Image: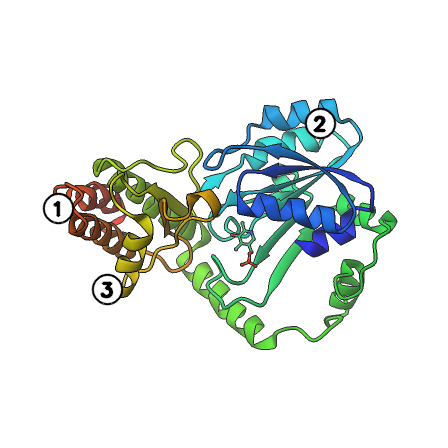
């Protein structure tokens, strides 16, 4: 994310930042640290921005040089409509910079076809590796922009890295063990088939949403849900922090919680990486049991059954 900023924008450049959660906030802070002039386009947590809102903001600020956005805002489990936003930015001299950290490897993000200018991801999410590798791709016009950008950069100088990679080497020592791990992770994904991997994430996400709704639980991002993870509100009368700790420490089922004002209010169930049908079933069954333990009235199996009906579709003949 930092290399995207220092290679594509000079101090003083105006950028539009879509801020709908912790990672949108991170783009904003990064832009500030490197002396850009970020304009914040806030969106409620759990919602995706509308491309028309981006278009209106660009019309209001015609000197904006870039739009920074998440494809999947992991903190709120909502997606922003990157394809539609790209239709707006590609007609202008505005670079579209996309944090794809829970999108690349989760669902198809065809950067060239959509017109994304910079796409980043990391090793630690859908690529199933430990943290330590980051990936970045630039469009032709982003590489052109990089040539004119005044911003100090050394390790994160992408032109220097690219020059080395064309000679089949790297500018600096990479995390070699992780590159070997990446080779294996990508082989696994290729073996399953990328389309099948994406379909599996989508199916687990739909099953989780159906399970939550069957239990009468409210979704954090009902209208723009990410297939990477599903945020579910803890029902009134149950302490979310206590529920989360009980699930993890007493039942052995770990969920992500909420951040900032959502702390203690939501559970996030992941679907990325090697998550499959029975991780989803376990997750929903555990939620049913934990909620029941804390006195929330529910009928066992209601959520699990709703999820099973969706997961059935992928059973082999
Ligand atoms: C995980 C993640 C990041 C990276 O955050 P780290 O603190 O480095 O793990 C950035 N953006 C999104 C959308 C993420 O999900």
Can you tell me whether the CB of the residue at mark 3 lies under 8 Å from the nearest atom of ligand 1?
no
Q: Residues within 10 Å of mark 3 (few under 14, many from 20)?
A: few
Residue 198 screen position, x and y as percent: 42, 48
Numbered disc 2: secondary structure: helix
In front here: 261 or 267?
261
Side (left or right) of 104 relative to 27: left
User: Which residue appears at 55% of the width and 45% of the height?
Assistant: 109
Q: Is residue 311 above or below residue 160?
A: above
Q: Which residue is under mark 3?
A: 250
Mark positioned earlier in the residue sequence (2 or 1): 2
Q: Which residue is under mark 1?
A: 300
Q: Are marks 2 and 3 in contact (CB under 8 Å)?
A: no
User: Which residue appears at 73% of the width and 51% of the height?
Assistant: 33
Q: Quadrant of ligand 1?
A: bottom right
Per the model, the C-alpha gap separating discs 2 and 1 is 50 Å
Is residue 317 visible in the rendered image? The answer is no
């Amino acid at each position: 994310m930092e290399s995207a900023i220092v290679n594509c924008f000079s101090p003083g450049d105006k950028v539009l930042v879509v801020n709908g959660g912790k990672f949108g906030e991170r783009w904003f802070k990064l832009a500030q640290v490197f002396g850009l002039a970020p304009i914040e386009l806030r969106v409620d947590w759990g919602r995706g921005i509308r491309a028309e809102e981006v278009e209106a903001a660009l019309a209001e600020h015609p000197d904006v040089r870039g739009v920074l956005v998440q494809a999947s805002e992991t903190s709120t489990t909502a997606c922003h409509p990157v394809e539609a936003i790209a239709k707006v930015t590609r007609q202008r001299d505005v670079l579209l910079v996309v944090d794809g950290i829970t999108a690349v490897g989760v669902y198809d993000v065809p950067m060239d076809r959509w017109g994304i200018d910079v796409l980043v991801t990391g090793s630690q999410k859908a690529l199933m590796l430990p943290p330590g590798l980051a990936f970045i791709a630039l469009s032709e016009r982003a590489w052109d922009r990089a040539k004119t950008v005044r911003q100090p950069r050394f390790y994160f100088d992408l032109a220097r890295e690219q020059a080395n990679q064309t000679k089949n080497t790297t500018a600096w020592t990479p995390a070699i063990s992780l590159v070997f791990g990446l080779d294996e992770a990508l082989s696994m994904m290729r073996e399953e088939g990328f389309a099948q991997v994406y379909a599996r994430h989508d199916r687990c996400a739909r099953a989780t949403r159906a399970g939550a709704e069957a239990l009468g639980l409210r979704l954090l991002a009902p209208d723009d849900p990410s297939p990477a993870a599903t945020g579910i509100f803890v029902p009134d009368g149950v302490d979310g922090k206590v529920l989360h700790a009980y699930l993890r420490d007493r039942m052995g089922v770990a969920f992500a919680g909420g951040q900032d004002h959502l702390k203690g209010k939501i559970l996030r169930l992941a679907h990325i990486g090697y998550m499959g049908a029975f991780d989803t079933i376990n997750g929903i069954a555990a939620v049913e049991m934990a909620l029941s333990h804390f006195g929330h009235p529910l009928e066992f199996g209601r959520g699990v059954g709703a999820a099973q009906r969706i997961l059935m579709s992928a059973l082999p003949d």
